[in-house]
Image (cartoon, helix red, strand yellow):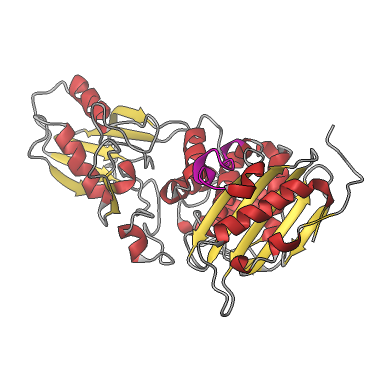
Amino acid sequence: MPPTGPFPACSAGKAITALALGKLYGYVINADTGKVLLDIRGSETTPSASVLKVLTASAAIVTLPPTYRAVTKVLTVPGQPGTIVLQGGGDHTLSRMTGDSYTTYYKPARLETLAAQVFSKWNTGTPITKIILDSSFFTGPTYNQAWKPTDRTNGYISNITGLEVDSDRANPDLTSTAYSGYRSTSPVLNTGKFFRSALAGLADGATLVEGATPAGSVELTRVYSQPITTWLAHAIAVSDNTETEYIGRHAAKAAGLPASFDSIQKLVTTSLNPLGIDTTGLVMKDGSGLAQTDRVTAKMIAQLMVKVANNQGGLGTLEGYLPVAGKTGTLAGRFKGPNQIAQTFVKGKSGYIPGLYSLAGIIDAKDGSRLAYAMFARSSGSNRVGYAARPALDTAATRFYQCGGGLTR
């Protein structure tokens, strides 16, 4: 049984007033009892950075079965013997890697596999002269107007398209010293070029055309992505922006919404409100938290983490995806020095955009309590937050671990 108190009072003290935290928004709840232990601007809205990913991931967990997979198909077109369709199913992990090369995504479907299957089933002597590239699985703009162009060229995010390989990285091969995370403006056409190359000898001169699958087309073969649980685990662990946007699109489509940016906020509110999470003030211009105009409250995120800690609505799986302090994901290199005492006991999703650092998750406190927490350190006036906000957030989380159920301001 979890401890229910009484707990000796234990002040967060200097840990939550450090100058490095700028203007702090914080909320801590005893996940065992529901008692609010700390509330610092908890109901005021703030930009989110990548902590927003826990909302997108939670909505996907609620909406999609754990066995859900994306499907990429090749179809033939009756009456057009030299034409095939490469029909995307929203698999950003579909890979052009061959042999022993690999990307950041675990055992993805490969174009070489799809091409080999086409070869084995191509029973006509007619070469492939035209490849229609169908990316219509998603709708709406492929790049968010709230993102900077440099977010793409710096490798933070790709265009979000229904047909794409390796999240459109210029060189996704992690075995290569020339690895490049640069993303292009033509991921669909690029995919077609790589597929045509994989069909060497069968489609050397094929014309590439972006368009819809013609009516009456017949499926020739297909490949499946890894299950959505693999995507979720990776997206939360390493804070993959593109992957999170894809996850949100698939969940929106499964919920009967358009698979577009405009559906993400509705997806989240309709998925999480029934679980008792107050989404008042929520603004989601995207699913990844890259947009500066996204808004959340610390209270909202902490409430979600209570549901995760208690596995309400099946959300307990999210806890297993959260990085662990000093051990895994984006927290592997954090919680150093005096904060080492909280390693393994603090789990959290971190975030950063210019002017804001964030951390939210679950703490297995020293006294046996389970705490749900959310913190956002934001620039305010002349007090500009910088890299020092990260260890300052770690210090605050460590203090929460020490205080447990007795935490006070």
Task: Give whichever of 12, 187 is nearer the camera.
Answer: 12
Task: Give whichever of 297, 29 is nearer the camera.
Answer: 29
Identified at 56% across, 79% down, the residue is 382
Q: Quadrant of the C terminus?
A: bottom right
**Residue 345 sits above or below residue 21 on the image:** above
Q: Quadrant of the N terminus?
A: top right
Task: Give whichever of 218, 345 is nearer the camera.
Answer: 345
Q: Is residue 99 magenta?
A: no
Q: Main secondary structure of the magenta part?
A: loop
**Which quarter of the picture shows residue 90?**
top left
* Residue 160, x across and y down, in percent: 38, 52
**Residue 349 in sight here:** yes
Magenta range is 320-335
* Residue 337, x across and y down, in percent: 59, 48
Left or right: where does residue 44 sit relative to residue 204?
A: right
Identified at 38% across, 34% down, the residue is 71
**Residue 271 in sight here:** no
